[in-house]
Image (spheres, helix red, strand yellow):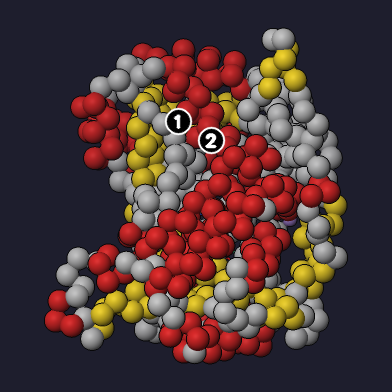
Amino acid sequence: MYDFINGNEYAPAPESTAIVNIKKKYGLYIGGKWVDAQGKKTFETINPANQQVLSKVADASKADVDAAVKAARKAFEGEWSSISGAERGKYLYRIARILQERSREFAVLESMDGGKPIRESRDIDIPLVAAHFFYYAGWADKLDFAFPGAGIGGQKVKPVGVVGQVIPWNFPLMMAAWKIAPALASGNTVVLKPAETTSLTALLLAEVIEEAGVPAGVVNIVTGAGDTGKFVVGHPDVNKVAFTGSTCVGKHILKSVAGTDKSYTLELGGKAAHIIMDDAAIDQAVEGIVNGIFFNQGHVCCAGSRLLVQEGVADKVVKKLQKRMETLIVGNPLDKNTDIGAINSKEQLAKIKSLVKTATKEGATVWQPGTSVPRKGNFYPPTLILDCAQSHTVVQEEIFGPVLTIQTFRTVNEAVEKANNTQYGLSGGVWSDKGAKVFKLTDNVKAGIMWANTYNAFDPASPFGGFKESGIGREGGLHGLYPYVKFNA
Ligand code: NAD
Ligand code: MN
């Protein structure tokens, strides 16, 4: 992503914020209209890189969520149910194209509200968001052929109804796309609640949905914190719940849907093992490790947060990794050279600091490069935790920051055992030159996604989701449509 002029690195100016028109205040998007929360309550959303208030956002109450669900029900039973799959597909294609046209605006806003480096929001998040809408647009008119055996005995593929969706702050727009695109493709209507620190791109997406001419009430966006989320998943007229967030909240949601006829998918936390075999291409593996843990400040559910490296190459890998980490730039998310942006919130920064402290208390060694870190704003340097044991808190618990634990192993079996020894089972990675080793590891590590000789590679056609306490159900690909359809005569 660098421009080279006569061999010298040319550092472009930070991305201009003038491209986005951030309103002073945002309402809720309900039934195709922008409305205040009924009690007029609002909360502030800030830029975590400088603590500046960006805007005020409506805080939706139970009554607001009820209004949103009613609007979604009305749209589901009215106009939306009478249009063909091909027509629904057209709306999704339109959304995808407008997203591409307005991608710079979205990228800048995503980085301002959430803290991620502009290089990532511009080159990864927003393009993947558009790709997701394009992908599901393609399925909208093919549902009758999508599910093997579904047509037998006169069964028809039907939407489940009104879906309540709650998403986290780490990939705000991407998570909104993962939720909304398959729901609409299969004919459902939506009430979506973004995370409280990153509501702005979901609200801008509502504008795009409006611009695309999607009928009123098909997509409703309600902003607020945990209580608003509770009202969405707990609403009796919601047919399906889709949640992405922490395992802790996921367990509460599972309890709240128990005994109801709501269907649900839960995409929860992770603590992925990133396994380096001694025959791996070390330089590439080091780049993979860096991408695996420092992408999006490590605020990634599938982050390669536990490095497992085979004893014979452990010293070499750690030395090369440390050398590479000395070059990482921590700072202004809007600077195109930034590698690690701002930590999403003060709370998250405090959590990272406290877990790293625990590591020292439990006997591990903390290593950080000499990188300078801005004093103002929420920043944390890339960090390694050496000399750790499987029982250490930092090896077992999700840190959700730029912090990598390092352990060694001797045999493939030992790597598998260590990789599986957590409550999570979302993702993992393996670097090896030998196909047999790759397959032995990818077959035996209990994780929904395994990458080989790459990491954090995403594609809308590929299903994503966890085993164990990392969740239930899949998003993406054809698998991602199953939770949004039912098979009836
Ligand atoms: P979180 O669970 O605190 O919050 C997620 C969302 O749930 C937010 O919108 C929040 O307002 C809402 N919420 C909070 N309490 C609620 C309740 N009782 N009922 C309903 N909604 C409630 O998670 P977070 O801190 O925003 O996100 C980080 C977590 O998300 C990490 O654990 C990460 O691994 C996970 N995550 C998982 C995936 C995946 O696909 N598996 C993807 C991204 C993030
Ligand atoms: Mn914010």
Residue 342 at x, y = what percent?
71, 42
Task: Give the answer, above or below, for where 48 lies relative to 67.
Answer: above
The single residue placed furthest to the top in the displayed view is 6
- The front one of 446 and 449 is 449
**Looking at the image, which residue is at 33% across and 79% down?**
158
**Looking at the image, which residue is at 72% across and 23% down?**
371
**Looking at the image, which residue is at 71% across and 33% down?**
336
Apparent side of residue 276 relative to residue 17 in the rendered image (left or right): left
Q: Distance of mark 2 from mark 1, alpha carbons?
A: 9 Å
Label 1 crowd bin: few (<14), some (14–19), many (20+), radius 10 Å: many
Q: Which mark is residue 455?
A: none
Q: Secondary structure at mark 1?
A: strand
Q: Identify the amino acid type marked 1.
A: Leu
Q: Quadrant of the C terminus?
A: bottom left
- Quadrant observed for ligand 2 in the rendered image: bottom right
Q: Which residue is mark 2?
A: 293
Look at the image and tell me whether residue 181 can be seen. yes
Residue 308 at x, y = what percent?
40, 29
- The front one of 151 and 356 is 151
**Looking at the image, which residue is at 67% across and 84% down?**
64
Q: Identify the amino acid type marked 2.
A: Ile
Q: Secondary structure at mark 2?
A: helix
- The front one of 67 and 157 is 157
Total labels drawn: 2
Q: Which residue is mark 1?
A: 307
Of circles 2 and 1, the one toward us is 2
